[in-house]
Amino acid sequence: MASRRQALKISVPVLAGVTGWLDAAFANEVASSAGQDIFSRTIFDNYVALYNAGDAAFADYFTEDVAMESAAVQGASLVGRQEIVDYVAALREYVAESITIERFAAQAGIIIVQARAGYLCHRDMPVTVLGGPFGQSLRRGQSFQARGSILYHLTEGRFSRISGGASVRFQ
C-alpha cells in the first residue's frame, strides 16, 4: 500500500551546485555594476508579492519573449509572457500557491534564489490538466511543499529566462 506521503525529487542539471554558490554569494545584496542589469531584493520582493497575490502584474517583470523551464511543467518550456500568465491562471483554478524567498543573490544580469513554495489543492486536478504539477494528479484538500533554486536571467531589467529545480513532498 502506498504511503500518503510521496517524495519526488526533481532537478534541473544546470542548477547543480547552486546551494554552494548561494552560500558563497552576498545574500541580500546587489552587486553594483554600472550599465549592467541589476535587481535589488526589494524589487524582487515586490515581484513575489504580486505573484503570491494572484495579480497578473507579476508578468510586468518579464520580457515579451521570456522562457521558463520549471520542474512544475515537467521539463517543458513556457515561452512568452502570455503563455506563463495563462499557465499560472489555469494552475490557480485548482491550486493555491504561496512562495517564500529564503535566499537571494544578484549580480549583473542574473538573480538566483532559494525558494519554498506551499500548495493547497482546492479542486480535484487530474494529471491531464497542465500535465499535473510535477507530474501528479491532485485531490481537493491535498497539500504539497516544494523547495528549490530558481535562476533568473535579466535583459534590460526584466526576466528573459527563468529555470528551476525543486524537491517536492506530497502530503
Image (cartoon, grey):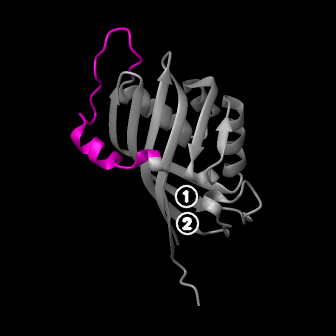
Callout 2 environment at 10 Å: few (<14), some (14 to 19), or many (20+)?
some
Q: Which residue is mark 2?
A: 143
Callout 1 environment at 10 Å: few (<14), some (14 to 19), or many (20+)?
some
Q: Residue furthest front?
A: 13
Find the magenta span and give its range. 14-38
Task: Residue 84 in the image: state x and y as whole percent.
Answer: 66, 37
The image's mark for residue 119 is 1
Three-letter amino acid code at disc 1? Tyr
Give me the residue at 57% from left, 85% from top.
2
Three-letter amino acid code at disc 2? Ser
| Residue 22 location, quadrant | top left
As drawn, 128 above or below 161: below
Along the viewing direction, whichever of 128 and 93 lies nearer the viewer: 128
Whether residue 155 appears in magenta in the rendering, the answer is no
Along the viewing direction, whichever of 126 and 156 lies nearer the viewer: 156
Give me the residue at 25% from left, 36% from top.
25
Cβ atoms under marks 2 and 1 closer than 8 Å: yes
Mark 2–mark 1 Cα distance, whole angstroms, equals 5 Å
Give me the residue at 71% from left, 57% from top.
131
As drawn, 105 above or below 14: above
